[in-house]
Amino acid sequence: MANESNAPAMTATMIILGLVSLAFMCLRFHCKRIMNANLGVDDYVLLFSWVLYLVYIIFSIYTTRFGLGEHLINVDLVNDLPKALYFLPISQFFAVLSVAVSKSSFILTLLRLVVQPWQKAALWFMLATINASMLSIAIVQFYQCGAVPTAGCIAGDHVIGLGVFAAGYSAALDIVLSAFPSLVIWNLQMQKREKLGVIIAMSLGLIAGVVGIYKTTTIPNVARDSDFTFGTAIVLIWLVAEVTATIMAASIPFFRPLVRKFSSQAGPRKESYGMSSGMTNRKGHNKLGSQVDVHNPTGGFDEESRSNKGILAPDGNTIVRKTEFSVEYDNSSSNEEDMGRGHRYV
C-alpha cells in the first residue's frame, strides 16, 4: 500500500477528459460556422472556461512531481511537500474558476432563449451566486491557517465548510439548470421531436450535478485526512469530470446541423435550388429546398397520346403540379424552423 499512487490515474484522466471537452467545444464552434452564426458571449465565456481548465490541468500534473497523488509517507517532507502545498492551491484556484465560468456559459445561453421576466431574474440570480460562491472559496483557501497559525489566517474548518457549501451549491445548480430548458424550449416553434432532443441534450448537466454531489461528500474526509496528498488527487479527478460534463452539456445542443446532415444523407434526397447565398444574414443561415410531384391520382400515362395525364388538373385542361418548398432557418438564439407548402398551377 505504501507504493500505491493516484498520480498516474489522475494524470491520465485529466489528459483524456481535457481532450474530450476540447473536442466537444470545437464541434460546437464548427456547427455555428456551418449555420453562418457569429460566436456569442456564451461561446467566448465557454472558451475562457476551457483555458482556465487547461491551466488547472497543467498545474495539477506538475504538482505530482512534488508528491501529489502519493501517500504522505512517501513524500519528501523537507524538499517536496512545501512545493506541493504551494502549487496545489494555485491549481485549485483555476479549477474552481473553471467550474464557475463553464456554468456561466450555459446560463448565458439560456438567457438568450428565455422571455419571461421571472426566468431572466432566476438565471441572473444563479449567474451571480455561482460566481460569488466559487470565487470566495478560490480566494479564501490561500488564507487557510497552516500548522503554525499566522495573524489573519482563517481556520481550516471554516475553509472546509465554505468549500463544501460552494461545491454543494454548484451541484444543486446543475440539477436546477438541467430542468430549466424544458421550461424554455417547449414553447419554441420547433417540431416536437426536435424539442425533446434539444431538451435532453441541454439536460445532460444533470451528470455534472451527480458528479458534483459525490465530490462534495469527499471534500471533508480528504481535507481532514492526514494522508491528504493521496486523497486530494481523487477530489481533483472528480473536479475534472464535473468541468468536462458541464462543457459537454453546454456544447451538445448546438450539434443539430451535424444531426441534420447525417439524417439527410440517410433519408430521401430533395431537389435543391442554390438560393442559400441570397438568404443569409449575420445571425443565421437560411436554406431553401424544393420537391416536385404530380398531383392527379386518377391520371396516368396515356399510351395512345404518349403523354402523362397525371399532371392534369381534375378539369382535364389545366396542368397542375405540386411543389413542396422547405425553408430552414438556423439561428444561435432561436433555433426555429418554418415549413411552407403550396400548389402552383401552370
Image (cartoon, helix red, strand yellow):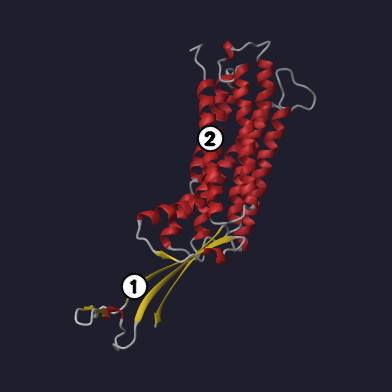
Q: Which residue is mark 2?
A: 19
Residue type (three-letter) at the residue carrying disc 2: Leu
Q: Secondary structure at mark 1?
A: strand
Mark 2, mark 1: which one is toward the viewer?
A: 1
Q: Is residue 229 left or right of residue 4?
A: right
Rendered position, 94 above or below 146: below
For residue 272, above or below residue 253 = below
Q: Are marks 2 and 1 in contact (CB under 8 Å)?
A: no
Q: Is residue 161 visible?
A: no
- Residue furthest to the left: 304
Q: Residues within 10 Å of mark 2 (few under 14, many from 20)?
A: some
Residue 10 at x, y = what percent? 53, 25
Which of the two residues, 318 or 52, is positioned nearer the viewer here?
A: 318
Q: Residue at x 31, y 78 (%)?
A: 295
- The residue lying toward the viewer, choosing from 28 and 84, is 28
Provide residue 115's location: percent of width, then percent of height: 59, 63
User: Who's the residue at 42% across and 62% down the image?
Assistant: 192
Q: Position of residue 289 (x, y in %)?
A: 44, 66
Q: Position of residue 52 (x, y in %)?
A: 64, 36
Q: Quadrant of residue 46?
A: top right
**Residue 133 in view in this figure:** yes
Q: Secondary structure at mark 2?
A: helix
Nearer to us in this view, 323 or 241: 323
Label located before the other in sequence (2 or 1): 2
Residue labelled with disc 1? 293
Image point (52%, 64%), residue name: 276
Q: CA distance from mark 2 to mark 1?
A: 48 Å
Quarter location, residue 290? bottom left
Query: Looking at the rendered structure, which numbered label has been put on residue 142?
Result: none
Where residue 236 sits, quadrant-wise, is: top right
Say which amino acid is labelled 1: Asp
